Amino acid sequence: MIRRLDHIAIAVVDLEAAIARFVDDFGIQLAGREDVPSASTSTAFLPIEGTQIELIYPIEGEGPVAKFLAKRGGGLHHLCFETDDIDGDMQRLIKKGYRFLTDAPVDGAHGTRVVFIHPKSAGGVLIELAEYSR
Ligand code: CO
């Protein structure tokens, strides 16, 4: 079951400049950074009141975020819901006709398992589901 909004991800062309904007201009603290090889991204996390902003930047100019930036420039990339049963939610949504970007969840940041719903299945919004290991 989907439980909460885990994060909102923004694709950025300059990770250091984006971190500086959120920290220095908006006053949101940087909680950490992590490379996510499964998504070819370098990620920075800035928590705010029950959720967080996630800045994503392509590692070595490759992967889906690099393609997104090349096509559209920086901007809102996806939102992520935390679920307590990613496999169950995936099966339930597939039965309703949703398409996913991968056949099964993959390793995400923070020790999560994640999967993305195709934006064409969800009104043009790329939606990630994430389950934390307990
Ligand atoms: Co995400």
Image (spheres, grey):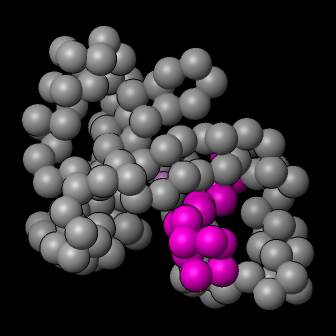
Question: Residue at left 40%, top 69%?
Answer: 38
91 displayed left or right of 6:
right
Q: Say which quadrant the C terminus sits in.
A: top right
Q: Tell me where residue 124 sits by quadrant.
A: bottom right
Depth order, front residue of 44/97: 97
Q: Using the image, determine if residue 19 lies above or below residue 58.
A: above
Q: Tell me where residue 58 sits by quadrant.
A: bottom left
Q: Say which quadrant the N terminus sits in.
A: bottom right
For the view shown, which residue lies furthest in the front direction? 123
The reply to whether residue 91 is in sight is no
Residue 46, magenta (yes or no): no
The reply to whether residue 132 is in sight is yes
Q: x, y percentage for residue 7?
A: 53, 42
Question: Residue at left 39%, top 28%?
Answer: 46
Where are the magenta residues, as a range? 119-132
Depth order, front residue of 122/64: 122
How many marks can you see?
A: 0
Question: Residue at left 19%, top 63%?
Answer: 73
Q: Using the image, determine if residue 113 lies above or below residue 87.
A: above
Question: Residue at left 47%, top 25%?
Answer: 47
Q: x, y percentage for residue 2?
A: 80, 51
Residue 123, magenta (yes or no): yes
Q: x, y percentage for residue 44?
A: 31, 39
Q: x, y percentage for residue 84?
A: 81, 50
